Amino acid sequence: MGNKITADTKFSILGTFEGECLDTQITNLNGLDITLEVMENVIASEEYKQGIENGWFIGFLGHPEDPGCQEFMNACIVLKDMWIEDSGKVYAKFDLIDTPVGQIVKKFIDAGVTFGVSIRGAGDIVGNAVDPDTFMFRGYDLVAFPAYPESIPTFTAIAASTDLAERKKYQAVCAAVKANLDSITSSATIDVLQSQFAPQSEEYKALEKRKATINSADTINIDAQKVQAMTDLYLQAAEEVKVLKSENQKLKMEKNAITAACKRKVSALQRISDEQLGDTLDSLDTVTASRDSLRRSMRKLNEDLKAEKKSNLIYKQKITASTQEIKQKDSTIADLKSKLRETVTASKDVKSSVSNLDNENKKLYSELIACQNLLTTYQQAYADIYANVLGVHLDNINVTSSTTVEDLESAIDSAVNTANVPARADMLEGYVEEVEETVDDDGVILL
């Protein structure tokens, strides 16, 4: 949506520039690359569309030091349109404004000076290329020795005056010349018409071309009716100028008020935008750091998960082996329990047998004691008989059940020798032999 031209709109345009302004395919003479992406981002942005609609891309004669310069008393051009050709070259159209600087530019052009244009903006430089994400476009300026050698747009003068009425007159004259150019047959007529145009204008060049085809000896043949119509158009335009001047003054005041308000709003919006952008960038850094931390944590968790899976596989294998071993042990335990039950049963039987044997042993022991006592009695009787036969007293001979016949005889013989009664031994020999027959090989008397 552009500025709509109406009869009440103020015109202060001395002419237009149109042509190449930038080449995205080459490095400029300042050693910088302004790429196709940079310019596509600029043209696609809402800021550019709003700037074109409101005429905010104002240029200066020469680059100001501040890319965002707002000292418009030194300005002279306004960007009206910009587009990119398939070749990657950027073209634009500018209005040359009737400011003190604009008048200076016009005078230089009239003197034969050709101006170039150079882009103005601010942004980060990565290597030698402008960063498309940070570049802020602020317009073009008129310069000599442009950074792109072909950035020399063509200038076309619009009118000698800046007023709407004079511009309308100029446009009407241009239209009349274009429509009737082929019917002009006089060089003198062309000289009169050329005096109304700047030498570098397209109309002047067209008249000059037509003049070359006309015989210079032709007589002047001017259509009086057309001249009168042009004069009437001029007079009508002069009347309109009077009305428009007062309206222009009013509009100028309104414009100044609106411009000041817009500047304040733009400044506030820029400040808010910068603050929000700073907060957003801080939040983005935080989120990025958090994301990186989460990625590291996820990688660590994945590694731990793989290790756990491997460990679990080992544990499963161990559990399987342990289960088999437990089954084997359970079988062994079952066998041992069966054997234990058998052993317990056998033990009970053994205990019962032992108990019976104990009873039998006690009985046998009692019988053994009785036998020993009886044997002792018999041994004592034998000793008494043997001693009596020999005539020996046995007071000093100790006889027990364990006393053998040899011990007893030896003891009695000892007693006999002491008593000196050997003659009686022969007497007892036959008797002793008889008694000995009743004694076994171990010296125990046979009952």
Image (cartoon, rainbow, N blue to C red):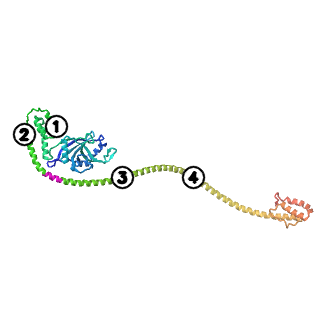
Residue at numbered disc 1: 205
Specify which label sits upstream in the sequence, 3 or 4: 3
At label 3, which amino acid type do we have?
Asp
Mark 4 vs mark 2, CA separation in Å = 132 Å
* Label annotation for residue 329: 4
Instruction: Tell me the quarter of the picture where residue 186 sits.
Output: top left
Going from N to C along the chain, the mark reached first, 4 or 2, is 2
CB-based contact (under 8 Å), mark 3 and mark 1: no
Please provide the residue range marked out in magenta: 246-254
Q: Nearer the viewer, mark 2 or mark 3?
A: 2
Mark 2, secondary structure of its residue:
helix
Q: Identify residue for label 3.
A: 285
Q: Amino acid at mark 2?
A: Gln
Reply above or below: 362 against 106: below
Q: Pinpoint residue 178: horizontal percent, then vertical percent.
A: 14, 38
- The percent coordinates of residue 359 (x first, y second) are 70, 62
Does residue 435 appear in this view? Answer: yes
Task: Tell whether label 2 touches label 4 (CB within 8 Å).
Answer: no
